[in-house]
Image (cartoon, grey):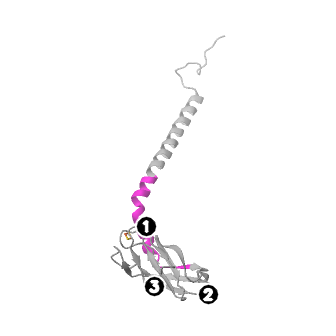
């Protein structure tokens, strides 16, 4: 009466055990894949970052700042031109200029100070002329890069010269 079933033997795998084994293998494979991706992706981004950044920066030759024509006189709009911080200045006399906001000394982001009519770098005290971008004092060796500005009724077009 007590016939042994083929699945009663502890050494014989049952169809359920095979399914469990398959499931565990798949689950471990999925966890391993996720773990490798979690480690590999940041490493890839770290290694590829300078290439992607320089390619993105080189690819951008112009951009329109929608509604920037309403920028009040004596104020500045900071934006990214490609990957570089850039500033659009609307001078009190009504003229416009777009300059890179990256200091030519060691690359700090500069700041427009309208009350003093200068562009100032807080890192080492370098200053630039906000009307031309020329370096006027401190360690910066070169002027700020200047971009072309075209003000329209719907925005401001900034482009490489
Ligand atoms: S980084 Fe701007 S003055 Fe040194």
Residue holding disc 3: 131
Mark 2 → mark 3, Cα distance in angstroms: 23 Å
Camera-near label (1 vs 2) is 2
Please tell me whether mark 2 sits on a helix, a strand or a loop. Answer: loop
- Find residue 48 and report its horizontal and vertical position in percent: 41, 60
Label of residue 53 in the image: 1
In the image, the residue with mark 1 has its CB under 8 Å from the nearest atom of ligand 1: no
Residue underneath mark 2: 153
Residue 49, located in which quarter of the rendered image?
A: bottom left
Q: Nearer the viewer, mark 3 or mark 1?
A: 3
Residue sitting at the far right: 1
Judging depth in this view, the residue of 106 and 146 nearest the camera is 106
Q: State yes or no: Cβ of the residue under disc 2 lies below 8 Å from any atom of ligand 1.
A: no
Q: CA distance from mark 1 to mark 2?
A: 32 Å
Q: Position of residue 117 (x, y in %)?
A: 48, 81
In the image, the segment drawn in magenta is 41-64
Indicate whether 7 appears above or below 39.
above
| Quarter residue 74 falls in | bottom right
Q: Any magenta on residue 141? A: no
5 or 97: which is nearer to us?
97
Where, by quadrant of the figure, is residue 142 drawn?
Answer: bottom left
Q: Which mark is residue 160?
A: none
Q: Sequence-wise, which precedes: disc 1 or disc 2?
A: 1
Residue 46 highlighted magenta (yes or no): yes
Q: Is residue 127 left or right of residue 16?
A: left
- Mark with earlier residue (3, 1): 1
- Badge 1: residue crowd in 10 Å (few <14, some 14–19, many ≥20): some
Q: Are marks 2 and 3 in contact (CB under 8 Å)?
A: no
Residue 62 at what x, y percent from top left?
Answer: 49, 80
């Amino acid at each position: 009466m007590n016939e042994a079933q083929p699945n009663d033997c502890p050494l014989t795998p049952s169809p359920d055990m095979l399914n469990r084994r398959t499931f565990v293998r798949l689950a471990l494979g999925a966890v391993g894949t996720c773990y490798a991706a979690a480690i590999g992706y940041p490493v890839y981004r770290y290694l590829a970052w300078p290439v992607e950044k320089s390619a993105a920066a080189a690819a951008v030759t112009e951009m329109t700042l929608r509604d920037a024509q309403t920028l009040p006189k004596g104020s500045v709009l900071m934006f990214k031109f490609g990957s570089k911080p850039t500033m659009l200045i609307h001078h009190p006399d009504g003229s416009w200029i777009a300059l890179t906001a990256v200091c030519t000394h060691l690359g700090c982001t500069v700041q427009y100070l309208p009350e003093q009519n200068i562009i100032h770098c807080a890192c080492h005290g370098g200053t630039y002329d906000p009307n031309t971008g020329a370096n006027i004092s401190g360690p910066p060796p070169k002027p700020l890069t200047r971009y072309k500005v075209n003000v329209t009724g719907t925005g401001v077009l900034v482009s490489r010269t």
